[in-house]
Image (cartoon, rainbow, N blue to C red):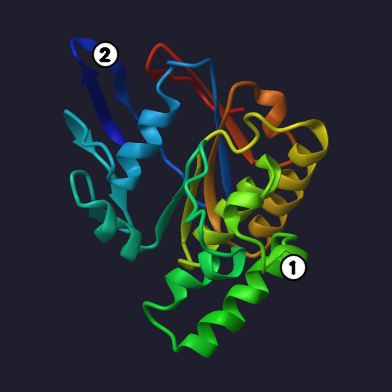
């Protein structure tokens, strides 16, 4: 991101943000309203910046449609899970694969991801029957099914108890070992510990140096 700013109803949400991720996992932490979610939404194409550039693989993607950005290899995991509640866990994960694989191949690939995120025993359950922690794992699995180069995870630990937060943390470390890059947001830096390679504090729409 290069000099990215965003204003909502006269309120400056992002102030000339400059942020660069070469590779690995980067964490962005700060209180509600600091601009973390807006930053991810702009990268994913859900929001448009008022000024500035968002460069991915040498191309300025600012203002491109979310679908186009997703095809380029960027996926987003929302803070509030958005599964197809009347579909099974397996069907939810298989759906992105069906765009480029046969039904049988999509199911096989989806099963591998369900195993990867720890939902192997839940594949035949409707998504609407899952716990909050399981829904978070499902959202991560759905994002992985797009075979992303960059994952954007908005508050993946929000609303989870200690045990489920540990489960999500383990999955994120596994994803990092697979070589996928990611930007992860959280309220506090300690939530990102042992997950990200570098953390940046965001307050008042500004981002501080990493540490």
Find residue 120 and name its label: 1
Q: Position of residue 29 (x, y in %)?
A: 56, 24
Q: Is residue 144 above or below residue 75?
A: below
Q: Position of residue 153 (x, y in %)?
A: 52, 43
Q: Nearer the viewer, residue 118 or 62?
A: 118
Which one is closest to the eye, mark 1 or mark 2? 1
Comes first in the chain, label 1 or label 2: 2
Horizontal side of 104 relative to 10 (left or right) equals: right
Q: Residue at x 43, y 69 (%)?
A: 96
Horizontal side of 130 relative to 49 (left or right) equals: right
Is there CB contact under 8 Å for labels 1 and 2? no
Q: Nearer the viewer, residue 175 or 25?
A: 175
Label 2 sits on residue: 12
Q: Is residue 188 above or below residue 199?
A: above
Q: Residue at x 64, y 21 (%)?
A: 188
Q: Is residue 177 above or below residue 81?
A: below
Q: Position of residue 157 (x, y in %)?
A: 65, 34
Horizontal side of 67 relative to 204 (left or right) equals: left
Where is residue 48, by image quadrant?
A: top left
Quadrant, the C terminus: top right
Quadrant, the N terminus: top left
CA separation in Å, label 1 and label 2: 44 Å
Secondary structure, mark 1, is helix
Q: Residue at x 60, y 38 (%)?
A: 156
């Amino acid at each position: 991101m290069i000099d990215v700013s965003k204003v909502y109803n006269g309120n400056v949400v992002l102030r000339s943000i400059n942020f660069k991720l070469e590779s690995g996992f980067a964490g962005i932490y700060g209180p509600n309203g600091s601009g973390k979610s807006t930053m991810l939404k702009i990268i994913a194409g859900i929001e448009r910046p008022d000024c500035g550039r968002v460069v991915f693989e040498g191309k300025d993607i600012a203002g491109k449609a979310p679908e186009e950005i997703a095809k380029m290899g960027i996926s987003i995991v929302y803070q509030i899970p958005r599964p197809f509640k009347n579909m099974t866990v397996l069907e939810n994960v298989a759906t992105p694969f069906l765009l480029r694989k046969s039904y049988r191949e999509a199911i096989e690939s989806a099963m591998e991801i369900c195993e990867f995120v720890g939902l192997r025993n839940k594949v035949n359950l409707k998504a609407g029957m899952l716990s909050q922690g399981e829904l978070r794992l499902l959202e991560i699995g759905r994002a992985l099914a797009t075979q992303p180069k960059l994952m954007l995870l908005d508050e993946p630990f929000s609303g989870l108890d200690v045990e489920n937060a540990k489960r999500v943390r383990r999955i994120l470390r596994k994803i990092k070992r697979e070589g996928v890059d990611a930007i992860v947001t959280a309220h506090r830096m300690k939530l990102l510990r042992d997950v990200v390679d570098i953390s940046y504090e965001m307050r008042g729409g500004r981002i501080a140096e990493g540490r």
